[in-house]
Image: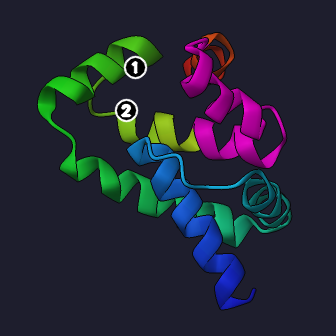
Amino acid sequence: MSKAISGTITALALLIAGGCSTVTESEYKSAQVVMKESGTTRRQLNAECIADFRGESSADKANMAALLGVSVARLPAAFCGRMISAMANGRLSYQDIYGARRDGNYAKLIAVLRG
């Protein structure tokens, strides 16, 4: 995998986990293709996403765990695994994620994350 693609995917996962919105639809679609085709990439992104949870506050973790219906201890693995899987297999489109932020309708995103 090229460094550019790897960087895009890493940035995408971090941006989604961190709530930023600087990923373009084209970058998202390219990342989806690579994630779908590469188990190694999905595992790497999952590990990086889980590591990023260390920086979240206890209150944020508790709220997210309640939303996902998992324990706080299970939250990082559940959130990251569900998000990356849904992105890779096409259950979450660019519009599902970034459109929700724009129009405030998080129903599909929440449903996917709840498993």
Q: Quadrant of residue 43?
A: bottom right
Residue at screen point 46% across, 61% down: 47
Is residue 89 covered in magenta?
yes
**Place of residue 54 in the rendered image (x, y in percent of width and height, measured from the top left):** 22, 51
Residue at screen point 53% across, 46% down: 21
**Place of residue 7 in the rendered image (x, y in percent of width and height, measured from the top left):** 58, 77
Say if 90 sits above or below 38 in the image: above
Q: Are marks 1 and 2 in contact (CB under 8 Å)?
A: yes
- Give the magenta-colored segment's residue range: 82-106
Looking at the image, is mark 1 or mark 2 earlier in the sequence?
1
Question: Which secondary structure dominates the residues rendered in magenta?
Answer: helix
Question: In the picture provided, is 62 more to the left or to the right than 50?
Answer: left
For the question of whether residue 115 can be seen, the reply is no
Say if 57 sits above or below 32 in the image: above
**Place of residue 76 in the rendered image (x, y in percent of width and height, measured from the top left):** 38, 41
Quadrant occupied by the N terminus: bottom right
Q: Quadrant of residue 105?
A: top right
